[in-house]
Amino acid sequence: MTYERMILDMKKQYYIKTNRTFTNLRKYGCIFTVLVAIGGQWEPKIGLLVVLIMTGLIITSFFSGRYWCGNICPHGSFFDSLLLPISKNKKIPQIFKSKYTILVFLIFFMWNFIRRILSIVHFWGTYDFLDKLGAIFSNTYLMVMIVGGLFAIVVNPRTWCQFCPMGSMQKISYLIGRKLGVTRKTNKKITIESKEKCKSCGLCEKVCPFQLQPYLNFNENNQFDDINCIKCSTCVVNCPIGILSLKQEVNE
């Protein structure tokens, strides 16, 4: 084997597939995704359940950032539980993490969603209204399952999550909660016992669903302060020397 081929193989294996579903909710939440996306095509009112999802993620993010993404999200469960085993699990291209990509996609999503809502307003007060409203949510769920699923298989399970409109809304909600000082009492962050104990093996990055780098970015309070951290604790479980934990945010 040539040196170049060896380096290439090492790069391909850099990100590690490991269990990310530590609770039944994270493991079987994908059933909800399939129920809404597929079942909603026959019974549109099922799509109305997405309203509860949107409400839940906005409320939880106000207090604890993107916790929903890593612990409750049905699509996250779909990506991590069903698609991770068959994913190429490659490095997520930077373009999907770009602020411009995230902003453009959020604007497009909001415009398209509002446009579709306005198109059914004249059905208000009729029996058909709930079916048509549910169909909007169900079709959106189906689109995310298909597009996000394709990205999950050919790139990385959490590629969609980098520019997901719901993820962007969570970050906005979290920043508001942070500005109001609410998160100081409710938010948790990945915490290291001591930066001196870290062996810089990089395993926390290799198993991170979002490919973040905690070992390089702990703050003065020994906490990983990244708005994109989904608090899934995958790095905590996989730390070879067990010095990571998910603890209350330290306030100075």
Image (cartoon, rainbow, N blue to C red):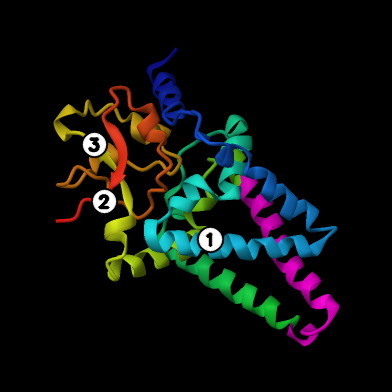
- For disc 2, the marked residue is 249
Label 1 environment density (alpha carbons within 10 Å; few <14, some 14–19, many ≥20): some
Give the CA separation, mark 2 to mark 1: 22 Å
Dot placed on the residue nearer the N-terminal end, 1 or 3: 1
Our reading of the magenta stretch's main secondary structure is: helix
Q: Is residue 101 visible?
A: no
Q: Is residue 131 above or below residue 72?
A: below
Q: Residue at x 80, y 83 (%)?
A: 123
Q: Classify mark 3: helix, strand or loop.
A: strand
- Judging by the rendered image, the residue that carries numbered circle 1 is 56
Residue that mark 3 sits on: 192
Q: Position of residue 43 (x, y in %)?
A: 83, 60
Q: Is residue 129 magenta?
A: yes
Q: What amino acid is found at the position of numbered circle 1 in the picture?
A: Gly
Relative height, residue 62 to residue 27 (above, below): below
Q: Which quadrant of the figure contains the C terminus?
A: bottom left
Give the number of the mark in front: 1 or 3: 1
Instruction: Report which quarter residue 122 is drawn in.
Output: bottom right
Specify the quadrant of the image occupied by residue 232. top left
CA distance separating discs 2 and 3: 12 Å
194 is higher (above) or lower (below) than 7: below
Amino acid type, mark 2: Glu
Please state the horizontal and vertical placement of residue 28, each as a whole percent of the image. 63, 39
| Quadrant in the picture for the N terminus | top left
User: x, y (%) of residue 81?
Assistant: 59, 36
Q: Which residues are magenta?
A: 121-150
- Amino acid type indicated by mark 3: Ile
Q: How far is the residue under mark 1 from the one under mark 3? A: 29 Å
Q: Residue at x 76, y 66 (%)?
A: 135
Q: Earlier in the sequence, mark 2 or mark 3?
A: 3
